Amino acid sequence: MSPSGSSRLALLVRQHAQTSALLGVDFVPAFRRPGAPRAIGAPPPGRPAAAVSAHADAPASFTEPKPGGPVTTAPLVPPRAPHPAAPPAASPAIGVRDRAAAQRLLDQALARYLAEAPHQHFVTAHTNIVFGSGDPCARLMFIGEAPGAEEDKVGLPFVGRAGQLLEKMILAMGLTREEVYITNVLKTRPPNNATPTLDEAARCEPYLCDQICAVRPEVIVALGLPATRVLLKTDEPMARLRGRWFEFAGGGLRIPVMPTYHPAFVLRSYTPEVRGKVWSDLRLALDRLGLAPPGRTEPPG
């Protein structure tokens, strides 16, 4: 039986508080544009035309542990050609900032997921459902592929090594975890962190769409090829997708999507070139939101 909405909310708040205490924040951006709003839930001052190529600015420096194991990127959806053009202006529905209503929609999406339990068809030994976290009215949404071991323990997305790197990237953008929304295609951990199968991704896609329609972000950053293929229905490699604007269409919404490398891939290929490409993609997302990107940031040490 699924827990009540209030119990579920209390659990999420407790899990988030515990995880925040474990992780901590070891640095803050060196520069924030004067007068820029702290929260990105407020409507943007204007929405500039989308850029279609990477910035030439120097990337932020992210100091992380040495790379871990390999990251697989097997296709999650049948191959289709990507939408090549820059996306049109966001739907008029996007930008509505009724946080209580958005949270109710997220609660309903979670209740639907718990009731239908698509993971019962998977080979999984998960501990927690990892549904999503962040601002229910976030203008910026990050979508990965599936929870890992640390995420499964605490029930929150992106809290392991890859999550710590993602959080540093978000901080380098001048934002915080609480100001964005983070989720995965799958809500339970695959065995041995395996890449989701076509069937697993297809069964979980409707609930991801529910989340997108509840949050109504103005920009989605797709982290890694599996999530990108679910959102865009493409078989193109990430090297040809990143740095270009595409579009998610679903639930009556048309939302700009910026594909980029998954933080786990960055840890595996921790080179200035790869980090520079990811930082360029994130700057494009900031431009799309009408937020001036911070200057170069250097974590201590």
Image (cartoon, rainbow, N blue to C red):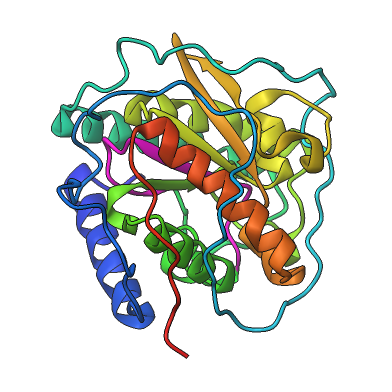
Q: Residue at x 56, y 21 (%)?
A: 248
Range drawn in magenta: 132-148
Taking depth in this image into account, of 205 and 65 the one nearest to the observer is 65
Q: Is 10 above or below relative to 182?
A: below
Q: Position of residue 80 (x, y in %)?
A: 81, 18
Q: Residue furthest bottom?
A: 301
- The quadrant of the image that shows the N terminus is top left
Question: Which residue is depicted at the point 43% across and 36% down?
Answer: 287
Vertical side of 109 occupied by 119: above or below = below
| Horizontal and vertical percent position of residue 27 | 34, 78
User: Whole-percent x and y of residue 243?
Assistant: 65, 38
Residue 116 on the magenta span: no
Specify whether 102 is left or right of 232.
left
- Relative to 216, say whether 30 is above or below: below
Residue closer to the observer: 264 or 6: 264
Left or right: 233 in relation to 156: right
Judged left or right of residue 1, residue 36 is: left
Tell me the quarter of the picture where residue 54 sits. Answer: top right
Q: Position of residue 116 (x, y in %)?
A: 50, 33
| Left or right for 24, reference 253 | left
User: Which residue is drawn at the image coordinates 22% and 38% (left, top)?
Assistant: 41
In the image, what residue occupies the spot 27% across and 58% down?
32
Q: Is residue 246 visible?
A: yes
Residue 265 is at least partly visible in this image: no
